[in-house]
Amino acid sequence: MSGDRIPERLLDDARARIVEVISGYVHDLKKAGKDWSACCPFHNEKSPSFSVSESKEFFYCYGCGASGDAIKFVQEMNPGITFRDAVRSILGEISLESSSAPRRSTIKAVTCNLPGHAEDREKASSAMAATHLIEQHKYLMQNNTASITPCAVDRKGILMVPMINNIGETTNVAAIMASGSVHYAAGKPSFGSTAILMPEGEHDGKTIICVDYAHAWRIWWAQRGKSRVLACMSPDNFRWMLLNCKERFTHIGCDPAEADEHVDYGRAVVAVPLDPYAKIDREKVA
């Protein structure tokens, strides 16, 4: 292999060898249906969450979010190696002294950097301007996740939660009813303006994905405001995220009845409802 540019046919050949490459580093890699599975080499774990798709020529860890092709894998396992040398090693032109010791992968953050529409921001601002603060709210008490910091409610006592995108704009406001249903000040948000509940203080490293904003709010309180929670707004978006945007979250918020199914796929689960406020006397706070 000479010159600055690696021929595309050689890159294709290197990527096609993904199972062969990874099995050389990950000795417990085993066939799992149409794919391959093992404990992740990039973080410590007891149950396999690392998956390799031979047909897609792609690896992914459901636990830490590490992902890429065979070339990326070799580079991750050999810090400092160039792209060209990673390809050459896969094709047998050079040998590497690599370390397969587990390394902690960088937590992948949710990316949601689309700016909000000016009209939506104006509606959201107006909705929040008409609220006042209270210590607790009926919805949170009903779901055993009463807040320990003030909540914003409108004149009817409805919980009003600002929806903030990844660049800090309040793009909408979710009005959460005591029944758990959600209405939006600026209309139901599109996928591009997916809502994120940000940590109040120090981030615990979790980015939790769930279906709707009511669940996101409950999870956020249950995590005591330390986790980053992403609301996909609909089951269809949730499924789409699971299939196409795995690197954008570290945990899944789901109904307890669905938890085992996600665990079987190697996903980290935060069940809904979580119950850190189980000792709350609802009669006293009602």
Image: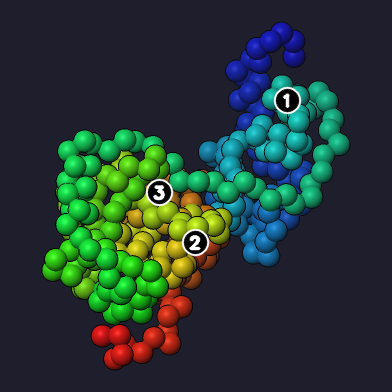
The Cα atoms of the two marked residues, 1 and 3, are separated by 31 Å
Q: What element carries label 3?
A: helix
Labels 3 and 2: the sequence-earlier one: 2
Q: Name the residue under label 1.
A: 82
**Number of numbered labels in the structure image:** 3
Give coordinates of residue 124: x percent, y percent.
21, 48
* Amino acid at dot 3: Met
Foreground pick, 149 / 37: 149
Where does the N terminus fall, quadrant-wise? Answer: top right
Residue farthest toward the left in the current orientation of the protein: 156
* Amino acid at dot 2: Lys
Which dot marks residue 241? 3
Residue drawn at x 21%, y 73% as measured from the top left: 178
Residue farthest toward the top in the current orientation of the protein: 3
Q: Name the residue under label 2.
A: 226
- Mark 1 crowd level (few <14, some 14–19, many ≥20, 10 Å Cα): few
Q: Pointers 1 and 3 in contact (CB under 8 A)?
A: no
Foreground pick, 281 / 241: 281
Give coordinates of residue 190: x percent, y percent.
25, 44
Where does the C terminus fall, quadrant-wise? Answer: bottom left
Of circles 3 and 2, the one toward us is 2
In the displayed structure image, the side of residue 268 where residue 13 appears, left or right: right
Give coordinates of residue 196: x percent, y percent.
37, 51
Q: What element carries label 2?
A: loop
Residue 168 in view (yes/no): yes
Quadrant of residue 245 within the rendered picture:
top left
Of circles 1 and 2, the one toward us is 2
Residue drawn at x 48%, y 51% as measured from the top left: 249
Q: Is residue 14 above or below residue 228?
A: above
Give coordinates of residue 284: x percent, y percent.
31, 90
